[in-house]
Amino acid sequence: MLVFYDLLPGQSPLSRTVVTIGNFDGVHLGHQVILSRVVQRARELDGQAVAITFDPHPLKVLRPTLHLPLLTTPKQKLELLAACRLDAVVVLPFTPEFAALRAREFVAQYFCERLRVREVVIGQDYCFGRGREGNIDLLKEMGVNCGFTVQVVWAVEAEGAVVRSSLIRALLRLGKVAEVRRLLGRPYGISGQVVPGKGRGAKLLGVPTANIRPVNELLPASGIYAVRTRRSAAILPGVANIGTAPTFDNCDSTLEVHLFDFAADLYGEELEVEFLARLREERRFPSIEALATQIQADIAAARQVLTEA
Ligand code: RBF
Ligand code: MG
């Protein structure tokens, strides 16, 4: 998959494209339907399948006071888009100047001149351009002169609701990772580097944990989770704790993973933790022994969940 971080005037590295546009945070089931339609139409039209997306997320520029933790890092988003079999992704730097571009100018400059678009595939409620003035009607009208058709993709429902990034964020804040998995079409994953912890897990509890410094902006609610951890190509089962370990009067919240039947040193490594099920809330235990007993029960519960997952 080719990745372009801008498309300059007079430059058209692609021709005969089928294009979609969106933020694609999370690359969830709704996005996946749009993206697979783009790929399918590109194959039918003997063209190239292209997604236009933005970095940073437009709302972070347009409404900087809004707290908008993203589901995917730019790197994760590109990996997920590549897995959808797109030919190219255009990541446009979203600046205040860019935001001021009229929808018509954007379509003319990017879709028509620089991407030679033949078909635009777009989600039913997507708006773009200054003041969100660009929509399906505007695209259909411009397509007549510019020589492209427009395909509208309807919202996807799962779990009785329209699949949206905002719903997935809300479910993660409640720790509902099993529901999130059904909306994403895969488990939610947090990437990060293994950093030194207090060394207490192995010493006091007999359960060593890898402490992970997340690169993702949004962590699931605090609690204990059954997880799978990706370490390069390997997938390792385990149990994770997100929280402050209140039994020990800590204050900072951490993400720690205990990997089953695993002993190697992981410091400095890049891992991705995938959340399959929430087992319980984090609690303050009256003694270290009581916590250790509970953790053994968590390990058994997680093993059970993971054999069924
Ligand atoms: N710490 C707590 O204070 N309360 C808990 O309920 C708790 N549950 C945990 C469950 C699992 C499966 C793991 C791996 C850790 C848990 N911890 C909990 C954190 C534990 O105290 C921590 O791993 C050690 O203190 C090492 O940092
Ligand atoms: Mg640790």
Image (tube, helix red, strand yellow):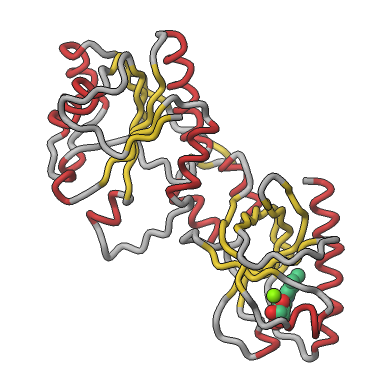
Quarter residue 48 falls in: top left
Q: Is residue 88 above or below residue 158?
A: above
Is residue 244 among what the camera can see? yes
Quarter of the rendered structure image containing ligand 2? bottom right
Image mark count: 0
Q: Nearer the viewer, residue 96 or 32?
A: 96
At a point 43% along the width and 14% down the height, the residue shown is 41
Is residue 125 among what the camera can see? no
Q: Nearer the viewer, residue 13 or 305?
A: 13
Q: Is residue 276 above or below residue 250?
A: above
**In this rendering, would 239 be left or right of 68?**
right
Q: Residue furthest top?
A: 45
**In this rendering, would 197 be left or right of 29?**
right
Q: Position of residue 8 (x, y in %)?
A: 19, 32
Q: Position of residue 217 (x, y in %)?
A: 46, 61
Q: Position of residue 210 (x, y in %)?
A: 69, 69
**In this rendering, would 285 be left or right of 29?**
right
At a point 25% along the width and 58% down the height, the residue shown is 63
**In this rendering, would 108 be left or right of 58?**
left
Quarter residue 99 falls in: top left
At a point 56% along the width and 41% down the height, the residue shown is 160
Q: Position of residue 105 (x, y in %)?
A: 13, 30
